[in-house]
Amino acid sequence: MNYRKKVAAIYLLGFFVDLINMFITSVAYPDIGHALHASVAQLAWISTAYILGLTIVIPASAWLAAYYGSKTVFMASLLTFLCASIGAGLAPSIEALIAWRCVQGLGGGLLIPLGQSMTYQLYQPAERPGLSSVIMLVGLLAPALSPALGGVIVDSLSWRWIFYLNVPFAALALLLAACWLRPDPPRAAVPRLDVGGLLAGSTAVLLLLLGLTMLGTPGELLTGAGVLALGAACAVFYVRGALRKSTPLLNLRLAAEPLLRIAMLMYLLVPGVFMGVSLLAMLYLQGVLGMPASTAGALMLPWALASFAAISLTGKSYRRVGPQPLFIAGALLQAAGMLMLLRVDAADQLFWLAGAYAVMGFGGGLCSSTAQSTAFLRTPDAQLSQASAVWNINRQLGFCLGVALLSVLLNGLLAAHGIASLDDPALHARAAQVFHWCFVLAASACVLPLALCLRIDNRAVLDLLHHHGVAKK
């Protein structure tokens, strides 16, 4: 195996580990809630804390690689992730689990940008589409297989083994990285780290998510509103500072480009919302309808197959029809799939559930692949690395906000209906109505991007593709 294939293999293994860890945990939420006496808001933080760690560390990835070397940082990230996985499995309380998940995110957050950078540097532009196809396949296999595997683990062993599962994969990646990766050549100059921007941005994200969580907690409405306002102030401070600096942590000026901005908003409002619906659906199917964890996790298989079909369709039709009709169809289909969940009132409606997940997967796949293909069409080559960082941060925030907002909505509606826990079977009928309202509101959020789609100059995008031969992303 030549060197670049070794680097690609290490990157894909790290990518697979990171995605498995992101998608496998949701199927274990009901068992974690029972074992650690955790509320819905606390369960949401199991995912939110991980994505928060990712979001904090990704902007610093380029500086860390330049200062310490890509191999060193990549291996340190894997070691951090491995130790945090063991810590999460041993966590004695929900608070300890959330803390370890954040540390996991800090380790896992560097695996994708560093691995991607190391790998793509070794492949010529004409060879990258083939590499991207393999990455796309891994990106679909992980969310398809991990919930089903996680469900079997939860039913057969314990929710703690969900986190122990990461250990052998991370250890293998760490061993291969130590043996195969070459040290970086010395650099003449290392860019200065925007410490103020890193602190302000991280604080803003933390306070916003904490404020949202507190808003959905009974008795903490005013405190949550105050924390949310403080987070918004930090976000404004960060954005104003980033726009004034010549070399900010993230070049937010790039988001002024209309296609990149619309693609980012589409990702926030469609795939991001699905992450929240996925959490709610697992709680509903297992906590209210009594579905086994393995069966609930297997529902991601039709989702992944439909997503693959949608991505393939986008690749074949994007240059012919442009982004506008694909965005519109994707948003409407994902909303329709979420509304199909309203007819689910028993655990044996597997055919209907599989159809709902397939429709959501096809719609979400259309939107995410079209957004990826559209985002950098007008971005100059010299700014691609910064634009990629902005794009990845937006993607992570979309997942994070989708989970946080829908958790707040669920908590608020449960409290309004006098439901303190999903463990009481006498309250399941009332709880089912609450979940249905959440699915309706989530579907409505997916329709909001249609106004953005109408602002796309589809003809201009097609002319750009045809006249300048822009490669499909």
Image (tube, rainbow, N blue to C red):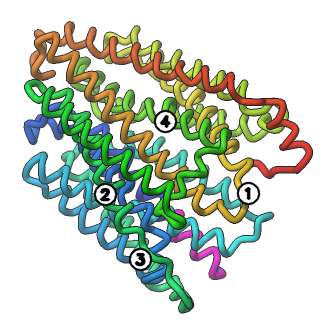
Using the image, determine if residue 38 lies above or below residue 84: above
At 36% from the left edge and 70% from the top edge, which residue is drawn?
A: 78
For disc 3, the neighbor class at 10 Å (few under 14, some 14 to 19, many from 20) is many
Q: Indicate which disc, 2 or 4, sits on the residue closer to the N terminus.
A: 2
Gap in Å between the C-alphas at discs 2 and 4? Answer: 30 Å
Q: Indicate which disc, 2 or 1, sits on the residue closer to the N terminus.
A: 1
Q: Quadrant of residue 306?
A: top right
Closer to us: mark 3 or mark 1? 3
The disc labelled 4 sits on which kind of residue?
A: Leu
Q: Indicate which disc, 3 or 2, sits on the residue closer to the N terminus.
A: 3
Secondary element at tag 2: loop
Gap in Å between the C-alphas at discs 3 and 1? Answer: 27 Å
In the image, farthest residue toward the right: 467
Q: Nearer the viewer, residue 341 or 318?
A: 318
Q: Quadrant of the N terminus?
A: bottom right
**Main SS of residues in magenta:** helix
At 42% from the left edge and 82% from the top edge, which residue is drawn?
A: 72
- Give the numbered dot on residue 129: 1
Gap in Å between the C-alphas at discs 3 and 2? Answer: 23 Å
At 41% from the left edge and 40% from the top edge, which residue is drawn?
A: 399
Secondary element at tag 3: helix
Q: Is residue 84 found left or right of 120 in the rendered image? A: left
Gap in Å between the C-alphas at discs 4 and 3? Answer: 29 Å
For disc 4, the neighbor class at 10 Å (few under 14, some 14 to 19, many from 20) is many
- Give the numbered dot on residue 73: 3
Q: Nearer the viewer, residue 317 or 456?
A: 456
Secondary element at tag 4: helix
Closer to us: mark 4 or mark 3? 4
Tags 4 and 3 touching, CB below 8 Å: no
Name the residue carrying label 2. Answer: 165
Q: Position of residue 104 (x, y in %)?
A: 29, 59
